[in-house]
Amino acid sequence: MTQLGRKILIVVIAFAAILLVITYIVPRLGDRGREGPPPGVQRVSEETRSVSLFYVNEKADGFRTQMRVVPADGDIEDQVKVVSAEFVKGPENDDLVTTFPDGALLLQVFWVEETQTVHLDFNRALVTNHQGGSTAEYYTISTVLKTVGANFPQIRLVQFLIDGYPVETIAGHYAVDEPLDILRWR
Amino acid sequence: MSDSTTLGVHAAAAVVALLLLAACPVTAFADKPDATLGVVYAEGRRTEDVPLYRLERGSEELYISSFDIARIFKATKYWSPESRKLVLRIDSRRYLFTIDTRVVVVDEEPMLLRVPIRYADGSVMVPLEFVTEVLTPRSREAIELDEERLVLTIGSPDYNITGIRFVEDDEGTRAEMDLAGELLYHVDSDTPGILRIKIYGGRLNPLKMTVPEGRGLFNRVRAEQTEFDAYLFFDVKRTAARFKVEFESAGDVLERERKLVIYLEKGEPPEIPDVDYAGKRMLEILDDETIRKEKTPIRVIAIDPGHGGIDNGKVGVTGVLEKNVNLEVALMLRDRLVGDLGLEVVLTRDTDELIPFDRRVEIANSAVADIFISIHCNGWYSPSAGGVETLFLAPARTENEARLAREENASIRFENPDLDPAEVDDLDFILWDMVQNEFINESSGLAEIVQKELADVLDIRNRGVKQGGLRVLKGLRMPAVLVELAFLSNPREEELLTREDFQERVVRGIVEAMRRYQEAHTVYTR
C-alpha cells in the first residue's frame, strides 16, 4: 500500500470509529435519564397513582385538567380525601383558575356503595367565602363533580354537605340539596 | 504529502463520513409518524392527537410511545435502564415490559404480544395491541379503539345522542336521531339551506354523527359538541320545500329512549324559510290547512330580582352589590311592562330583603303568571370573562322528585276512585311528565328569544342559552328563565350595570323579547 493509501485508510478507520461511538454508545449514555425518574428513585413497588384535577380556563370557557401523582393506599374514602387535598391546592398554571373558594376544605367523606353516592362534607367556608355569580358557582360544582368522576369511576352521585347538612344552594343559583349525577348534571 | 493530496484525502474521508452517517440508525424513525391516533377523553371532552409509528420491518403493527400511554391512562412509570425494563402502573395493576421482547407481565401473569417492545429515540415504544388486548379488558374505565379510523375513546362517554340514519320515501326524506333521556332541542336556520339543531345537554360523538354523504333531500350532516350542548347542521337540497321536526317514541319508554326526526318534504325549490322556535313535543310547522292557530295572550309576568337582604349576591370590583342592580332593573322593567304594555307584573320582592326560594316560586304560581323572569348579575374569578347569558331549567329526576310527582298527582286518584291503581301510576308518570315538559319546552323557546334580544341590544359578549339545575326555577308552573345580565367581576361591565342607559337597554331587550315570544307562542290545534 502506498504512503497516501495508508493515510487514507487511517483517516477512514478513524472516522468510522468516531461514527460508531456517536451512533451506538453516546445515545445510550444520554438516555439514562430520559425514561423516568433519576436513578436514585427506582422503587418499582411504590403505591402511587396519577389523578386528574379539573380547573377552568381564565375566560370561563371550559375545563382543563392537571395531573398529579398521589399515594394510592387506603380505601375509597381515604383516596377521595387525598384527591380533594390536592384539588384544593389549586392549579399550577397561571392561566387556569380554581373555582374552589379560599379556606374551603373537605372535612369528611362518606361513601355509600349501594347508591354509588359519595357524601362530601365541606366546611362553611365553601358557602360564606364563595364570591358569587352563577358562572362561578356552576364551575365550583362541576369541577368537584368532574374531579371525583374522572378519578373514581365507581362513584355515580355526589351529595354536597355543609358542616354535615344539605343546603339549598352554594351561592344562590344551583340546587345542591339532592345528590348530583356526575355524568348528567348541568 | 503534497497539499493537493492532503486535500484529496480529506475530501474522500468527508464523503465516506457522510455516507456512514446516512446509514446511521440513530435517525431511525425521527420525526414523521406513520399514523395519528385521535384520543377522545369523554369526561372532559378533550381530544388530542398522538403519533404512531411502524417500527417492525415486515409488520403493519403501529407503536405508541410509553410517554403517551402513561399520560392517557394516568399511569405511573418506572424505567430501569440496566435491565431494560419498564413498569407501568395503571388502575393499581402492574404491567412489566422488557425491551426487545414480546412479553408483558400483568401483575404475575405473562402475556405475549404479536411484536416486541422497542426502544427508539429515548422512548419505550409499545405496540397499540397492548391497549386493545391487554389494557382494555382490565381497565376500570371504558376504553374503545376504533381501529379503522384510529380513534381511541377513554371514559364512559354517556352519549345521549347515539345514532343517525336516513329513510327515504316518495314524499321526502327523514333524518332520524336516536336519543336517550329527556332532551330538548331548538331549530333555526340562519343560512338558507342549512338547518341547525341545538340539543341542550346533548352529548354525541362528533366523528360518528357527522355524515359526509346524506341521502335523499339531505346533502350532509355535520355534528359538533360544545361544553354544554350538541349541534347538528343539516345541509339540505334546494328541492326540499318544507320541514317538520318532532319526537317519536322508540325503544324503552322507561329509559326515555326516543327518536328526533326531521322530515323534509319534496317540493318546488325555494330555500328553507327562516325559523326560530324551540322544540315542542308534537309541533308541526308545515303549512297545513287543518291546523288552526290560537294565541294565548300574556297577561301576567312574574319578575324575580335575585338575592336580597343579607344575601348580597356577587360583589363587584368597586363594591357594587348584585342584589341592588337586580332590584333596580326589576323595578324599571315593571314600570315599562305596566305603563307601556298594560301588563300585570308581580315582583317576588320590591325591597332589599331575602326571600326564600320556595316563597318566590309560590308568589309566581299563585299569581298564575304567564312568564317568570329572574334577574341576576354574574361573577367570575378573572376580570376577562364577560357577557350576557340566559338559563332555563334542567330538571333532575331523582328519587325524591319521582315521589313528589306521585304525591302531587294523588288528586287524580281522589277524583277518579274507579281507576285501576296500576293504571293510575302510569297516568301519574305520564301526566307529570307532560306538565313538566310543557313548561320546560316553552322555557327553552323563551330563553332563546330573550337571549337573542339582549345580545342584540347590549354591546357585550353573547354567552348563549344554557340549561341548568337552578333552584329558583324548580316548581314553577309557567315558562321561566333566569337572566345573567353581565359580569360584576368585569370592570367595564360592572360600570355598565350601574348606568341607567344600560339598564334601559336591558329593559328594552326584555320587552321586545316578550313581544316576540307572544307572537311565536301559539297553541296548535287540529
Image (tube, coloured by chain):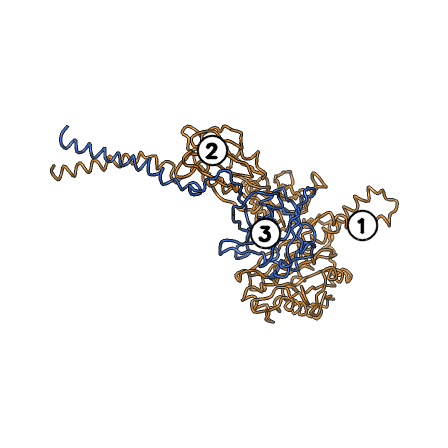
Chain colours: A blue, B orange
Q: Nearer the viewer, mark 2 or mark 3?
A: 2
Q: Position of residue B402 (x, y in %)?
A: 75, 48
Q: Position of residue A118 (x, y in %)?
A: 65, 47
- Locate the N terminus of chain B by quadrant: top left
Question: Furthest residue to the left?
Answer: B2
Binning the other alpha carbons within 10 Å of mark 1 as few (below 14), some (14 to 19) or many (20 upward) gives some
Q: Is residue B422 visible?
A: yes
Q: Nearer the viewer, mark 1 or mark 2?
A: 2
Q: Which residue is mark 2?
A: B97
Please tell me which residue lies in front, B492 or A105: A105
- Residue pictured at 72% horizontal, 41% vertical: B253
Labels 1, 2: one chain: yes
How far is the residue under mark 2 from the one under mark 3?
35 Å
Labels 1, 3: one chain: no
Q: Amino acid at mark 1?
A: Asn
Q: Position of residue B194 (x, y in %)?
A: 57, 49
| Residue B122 located left or right of residue B432 | left
Q: Position of residue A112 (x, y in %)?
A: 68, 44
Q: Which residue is mark 1?
A: B409
Parent chain of label 2: B
Q: Are marks 2 and 3 in contact (CB under 8 Å)?
A: no
Element assignment for label 1: loop
Please tell me which residue lies in front, B301 or B76: B76
Q: Amino acid at mark 3?
A: Thr
Q: Disc 1 or 2, which lies upstream in sequence?
A: 2
Q: Amino acid at mark 2?
A: Phe
- Residue pictured at 50% horizontal, 28% vertical: B112
Parent chain of label 1: B
How far is the residue under mark 1 from the one under mark 3?
37 Å
Q: Which mark is residue A143?
A: 3
Please tell me which residue lies in front, B88 or B25: B88
- Residue pictured at 86% horizontal, 50% vertical: B415
